[in-house]
Image (spheres, rainbow, N blue to C red):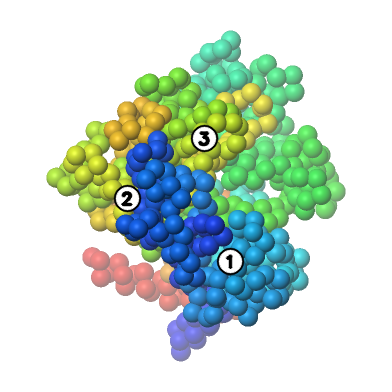
Amino acid sequence: MLRSIFFGIAAFLALASSASAQLASPPPRIPVVLVGGKLVSFSEFRFGFPDTCPLLHFHSVHPDHVVTALDGTQIPDPNAPACGFGMIGQLRVWAVFDLAIPDADFDGIPDAREAELGTDPNQADSNGNGIPDGDEDKDADGLGNAVEIVQYQTDPTKNDTDGNGVIDSVDVTLASTAKSFTVVPLLVNLYQGSGATEQHFRDAVALMNQFYAKARIRFVLVGVRTGQTAGDDGTGGGTAGDGRFNNPNDEGQKVQEAGGNEVAALPGGKGMKVAVSATGGTWTDDASPPPGWSRHRDPACVCEQRSSRERTAATIAHEFGHIFTLAHPTVGSAENTPGNIMTPSNGGRDAFVDSTDPAKGFANLTITPAQVASIVSDGIPSLFGVQGKMNSPAVKRPYQSGSAADAAGDETGGAAGSPLDLARISMASEEGEDEIHVLLELWGPFPDSGAIDTAFGLLFDTDASAATGATQAGLAGVDREVRIHVVRESGSAAPAVQAQLLVPDVFGVRTPIGGATLLPVTVRAGSNLVADLHVADALELRLRKEDLALTAPLVPMQVTSLTPGSSLFPTVADTMPLAFDQQRYLTDPDFVVTQEFADPSASVPFSLAGLDPNAPFEVRFDDEVVATGMLDGSGSFLGTFPIPAAAANGFHFLTATDGTVAFAFSAINVPEASPSLAAAAAALALAGLRRARRLDS
């Protein structure tokens, strides 16, 4: 009876919770190009590679050199023998909704809704500004008109449809991730000469975790290394081993490079890193040194040990916010307060943290819903950590990943620090997801002005067989290539950057595959308070798994940078090998808890597997150690841990570490009431674990 009551209530709670966050499934989408104010399907185009022009261009697939728009209008190729409809970057690419309701102009807005937006139901681009009406954002809430109407059922004329004080784009992002959390492995290196102590930073990380719980992000300290010197080598006039990193581009860059390489070597290539510098200043040659620095999307940052653990925790949390691509608050924004985590330390944050006012202090630092939504919507958690779902019990998502790091300055045919110098690549996805998130970091920035004609290649041996496919850049069996082209003909405008999916053959000929083969790419520039610090650029894109057709569990890959030009056989300037593991999650250690709820002081059964054999371990409830023991010869353990008596209501992280960089995690909820229900659940869970162990033996 208790069993049926427990599972009935648990099922109801899970259903109610998921229903509140569930969004309508997006309708099918078709890729299109806007030509002369008309939407034309990708299937109407082919891409010259190369053609009689030096760059990639759109051409009609038809022998009569005409494409047909979605509304039936025929558009002739303006330059069929040569450069076609224009080069990549000149024509805008979208994916519009394929509606099952009347939409005469195929702009994604149902005809019946065009009047309220003041748009013409017979014109895809009513105001002629080059943007289809469905992609316009009438209420400036960050969501296009068509997305609001069709996918989210929000009001395209109101930026806060439900009147809760949060704009619609933030609302829908938070709702879609309401039951998600991320666990990020964290390395801390205490540099020789820094004077930093391990306990100070352990305390600071525990405080930082209390703060980032607001964003459902948890950092697991998998290593604190003392007496480090890597990168602090005295170049550029600095002093080796003094714990201070000379500015610019010398020790600081090398320390950050070493940190990024350490993260790339972590399991799954996921994690973040803090290099701890001497108290009193990161830079020896800066009259007003900042207490920390970081680059957007770079997993390693530098932070000094500050005067209190609260200040240190706030500084690390601030730098991690930058890594998660958050910026300093702008005047007039909701974040522009002394207590916001992204306010600089000398902009009032230190004074806020130090205050004895009950409404201030570290515990009252804030991160706004918009900042949380920005982190989540940018896909940053999946790049740096492992994600889970607050199901019953909490479960790890089956993730896929690939990562690699490459030394600075090893490119050929280019100047040191050029964008041809590959730095790092991170690839993240999950089983069942349609796309792979790719972040390619470079050791040098693209020039601010002048012509650019540079390419990068992501080479995939999709079936892990050297016997099939072509041989490129030393990798045999290449079946797919993603060619990223960065182009600027002249001037100082932002370069046009897009990618094409190609199938290479043994003769070196690369053929675009059918369907949507032209992919948008974003150029991401790093950000740092130190104006002259070397800043690496990054290229970010998402690849459709359907187009890549990856069949091997472990896919060999090669990243290449190519010397400028569009030659059919370009010269490779730099390479970086890696593998994309489609079943990476299967090799992670396991932390199994078979219940979602437990009351304070309750005893909770758990099991561990896949950790370091015959090693001591500890289990933490959030940051409090609740169990220790010795793993068996297979790296496993079966036992119980107590919920702390003072545990607050709500969601809590569970992590197990074994002294190596490996860790296992789970989660549990402390309910507001119903102790008898929680006790019954614990008894049932323990019986289940014991039965499972008997069956295994």
Q: Is residue 548 left or right of residue 435?
A: left
Which residue is identified by label 2?
A: 512
Give the foreground label among 1 and 3.
1
Q: Is residue 423 left or right of residue 176?
A: left
Q: Is residue 107 visible?
A: yes
Q: Give SS at disc 1.
A: loop
Distance CA(mark 1)–CA(mark 2): 28 Å
Mark 1 or 2: the one toward you: 1
Give how far apart the Cα atoms at labels 2 and 3 are: 22 Å
* Residue at x 74%, y 48% (from the top left corner): 340
Q: Name the residue beneath numbered marker 3.
A: 488
Q: Is residue 312 above or below residue 288?
A: below
Of label 2 and label 3, which has the lower sequence position? 3
Place of residue 672 in the rendered image (x, y in percent of width and height, measured from the top left): 64, 73
Q: CA distance from mark 1 to mark 3?
A: 29 Å
Q: Element under label 2?
A: strand
**Foreground pick, 531 / 404:** 531
Name which residue type carries label 3: Arg
Q: Which residue sits at x=43%, y=76%?
A: 684
- Type of amino acid under label 2: Pro
Q: Earlier in the sequence, mark 1 or mark 2?
A: 1
Q: Are marks 2 and 3 in contact (CB under 8 Å)?
A: no
- The residue where tag 1 is placed is 124
Judging depth in this view, the residue of 158 and 622 nearest the camera is 158
- Corner quadrant of residue 456: top left
Camera-nearest residue between 302 and 654: 302
| Amino acid tagged 1 | Ala
Residue 273 place in picture, x, y as percent:
52, 37
Residue drawn at (28%, 44%), measured in percent from left and top?
510
Q: Is residue 147 visible?
A: no
Rendered location of residue 228, percent (x, y)? 50, 24
